[in-house]
Image (cartoon, rainbow, N blue to C red):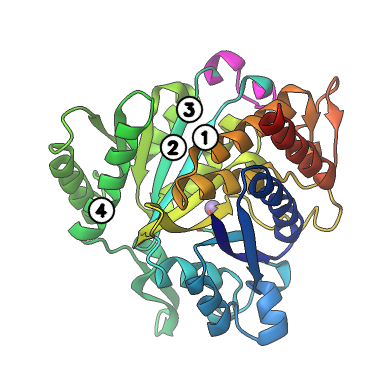
Amino acid sequence: MNFKIAVLPGDGIGQEVTEEALKVFEVVAEEFGHTLDTEFGLVGGAALDAEGVPISDSAMEMCNRADAILFGAVGLPKYDTAPMEKRPELALFRLRKGFELYANLRPVKNLPALQNASNLKPEVLAGVDLVVVRELTGGLYFGKPAERYTDAEGRKAVDTLPYSEQEISRIVRTAFELARQRNGKKRVTSVDKANVLHTSRLWREVATEVGQEYPDIALEHLLVDATAMNLIRKPAAFDVIVTENMFGDILTDEASMLAGSMGLLASASLGTRHNEYGGQYGMYEPIHGTAPDITGQGIANPLAAIGCVAMLLRSTFGLEKEASTIEEAIEQALNDGLRTPDLYQPGTTKLNTIQMGDAVAERVRTKVTR
Ligand code: IPM
Ligand code: MN
């Protein structure tokens, strides 16, 4: 196969980790007899600096011609106080909305090698293997009105949280399909705030209706505050969690601590567009941000970005073997005691970003040729 990939490294450590992801991508392609055809574009602060917009029309067009987008991270402190249309994050929203990438899949696993890396007790973490399905093109991120204004009483601001039954049913369906495919607990937890929000009551109603089409999957409804607690209290009980945009954003940062580090979690954003390989057009990005505090030091953890390549091969190209080879190589590197500083503990070997990329690439190679 020929992989036509639009690469948007973005800002901060996005650059550093994407390079390692591409390194591993090249090796997988080579080992399995595929070709990797990349095109690079500017996004976020990098695009604002060079072109005055968070993502240009030509970068959007480049993404449109590709099979998938490999995304690094966006956001720079110097744009923190800029108006919304001059903020790096706007690029993400344009990509998500523009390509209708409404389903954001964020898998969280606790690998045995990292059971001591989390602040949580190993016995709480044992068996954690869940996916958060975050709705990505609705809710507070896109609802109108969204503005700041001043009236006689003073400064005011408003954001709006809208959802339609179509938006809810398609994302809930994604969650049920995933629960069916996964070798998991066959359980969907739909997360809302139905004791307060109208949208949540609609969400719960629609989720229940969709659930009736999936008698083989257990559906539970859980309030978002209780979910936040249970993610720490008994995380191994979860299988697939489905929730609206902002709840999903917050809960996945929390859930990343079950894996051990933000630097480990990859995500896939999928939508309506399918391809001739029986897969889906998608954007793949680590859930971590640009980490300005460590940018340029070469110490960022590239494993989330590398994990994105595995998700890409699976969801866009249907290449399970290639995908699992990468995931096994990541796990092998961790089992071998290799750690970037975010996960370093005495008795393990500290590597920088490039060395970690090399270690995974090497393990992909030996796995295939062994
Ligand atoms: C994420 C990020 C983004 C989000 C930011 C950078 C706008 O936190 O992908 O989780 O809130 O969606
Ligand atoms: Mn986030």
User: Could you say which disc has been placed on residue 129 in the image?
Assistant: 3
- Asked which secondary structure carries label 3, the reply is strand
Spatial CA span between label 1 and label 2 = 6 Å
Q: Which residue is mark 4?
A: 170
Spatial CA span between label 1 and label 3 = 6 Å
Q: Are marks 4 and 3 in contact (CB under 8 Å)?
A: no
- Asked which secondary structure carries label 1, the reply is strand
Q: Which residue is mark 2?
A: 131
Amino acid at circle 1: Val
Mark yes or no: residue 1 visible.
yes
Tell me where the magenta segment starts and ends, as one range: 114-125
Spatial CA span between label 2 and label 3 = 7 Å
Spatial CA span between label 1 and label 4 = 22 Å
Spatial CA span between label 4 and label 3 = 23 Å
**Residue occupying the point 81% across, 46% down:** 353
Indicate if the residue with disc 4 has its beta carbon within 8 Å of ligand 1.
Answer: no
For this view, does 8 lie left or right of residue 311?
A: right
Q: Are marks 1 and 3 in contact (CB under 8 Å)?
A: yes
What percent of the width, then of the height, locates residue 1? 54, 54
